[in-house]
Amino acid sequence: MSRPVNFSAGPSMIPIDVLESLAANMVDYEGTGLSLIEVSHRGAVYDKVHNDTISLLKELMRIPDGYSVLFIGGGATLQFSMLPMNLMLSGGSADYVNSGAWAKKAIAEAKKVGTVNVIFDGSEGGFKSLPDPAALKPSAGSSYLHITSNETIGGVQFKSFPETGDVPLIADMSSDILSRPVDVSKFGVIYAGAQKNLGPSGVAIAIIRDDLLERSSDSLGAYLNYSVHAKANSLYNTPPAFPIWGIKLVLEGVKARGGAAAVAKENDAQAAVLYDAIDSSGGFYSCPVEKSVRSSMNIVWRLAEEDKEAVFIKEASEAGLIGLKGHRSVGGCRASLYNAMTMEGVKRLTSFMADFAAKNG
Ligand SMILES: *Cc1c(COP(=O)(O)O)cnc(C)c1O
């Protein structure tokens, strides 16, 4: 069976051995005689998957003591709402960096809860750059400072993070979680939808510094309350068992590859090959993003002749290179090189790009 190389932004490529393991164990989970998705979430079989997944994430991200790892349904989008509901102090305000499409959505939800200070606004520059993290300082009285570590649509990525002192730093890491080592102790909350770097869709992960759980008000709906999830070890209600199982297998694969640092090296090498193909194309292809903040996960580019972009995407797809259409809000081309991507896949793309440029240049 020949599978296409999947450059989709999310849901995205899942390692083939993970898919095979899910398939092989779907009906009879590891010899238990039943599927994992038909047994009690309070039984021993599921419990082990649940807790192994949490332990593996703690190990691979070096999450220090004093943080809780939560599984919450609703994707990163629900976190846009839950975060301000739980963490904005009453009558308070929070700082947001407007770095692109996802930050804008986070800001829109936070505005429904309290006052938002947009401390950097990249919209005038078309979201092609990011602020210097050292220049990002929290406003007086701010409940937290929120960034989007990697903008999946615009292709900009923070390479280092602001120092925010006593004000908790919050990051939406949906599209670059576990793609590189990160010092978790610098953050109050890290959250991410699973379906880019971690596994199947259907769950978000929230990593929360435990003292912040005290901010969650009892008046919140139970499912919307971080503290409720933390106290119940994410078993307040039936958890999304299937995606959590998939995440466990993905994390085992990351561990076998040598962890976040080893994966980061491979990711950077793959991104460098693709950016180089764009930059050395004599202007046939061009990347609009400022070099210092180019994402190693989502690489965006245009063709000098924009009317050829649709042909490029169609012919690439016929050649087994799929998911290269830029987000509908921005157009152009995009390749998502998440952890599951291989150098072989990237080289198939760059060789297709060279051929296409030769034929159409
Ligand atoms: C995909 C994405 C989201 C939205 O995730 P859902 O799980 O679909 O809600 C939010 N933020 C970023 C950075 C993303 O890439």
Image (tube, rainbow, N blue to C red):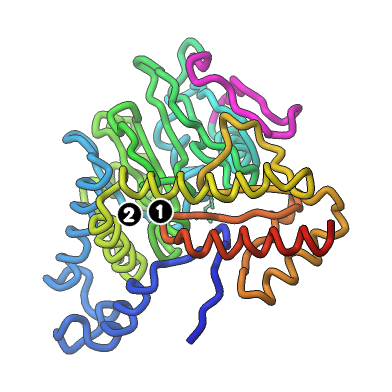
The disc label shown at residue 204, or none = 1
Can residue 174 be seen in the rendering of this structure? no
Please provide percent x and percent y for residue 36: 25, 78
Looking at the image, which is closer to me, 193 or 349? 349
Would residue 287 be counted in the magenta stretch?
no
Would residue 115 be counted in the magenta stretch?
yes
Instruction: Classify 293 as above or below 60.
Output: above
Q: Amino acid at mark 1?
A: Ala
Q: Are marks 1 and 2 in contact (CB under 8 Å)?
A: yes
Looking at the image, which is closer to me, 156 or 311? 311
Q: Which residues are magenta?
A: 114-138
Rendered residue at 24%/34% (across/down)? 210
In screen coordinates, is 267 left or right of 303?
Answer: left
Mark 1 or mark 2: name the one nearer the start of the chain.
2
Find the residue positioned furthest to the top. 140
Mark 1 burial class by Cα count in 10 Å: few <14, some 14-19, many 20+? many
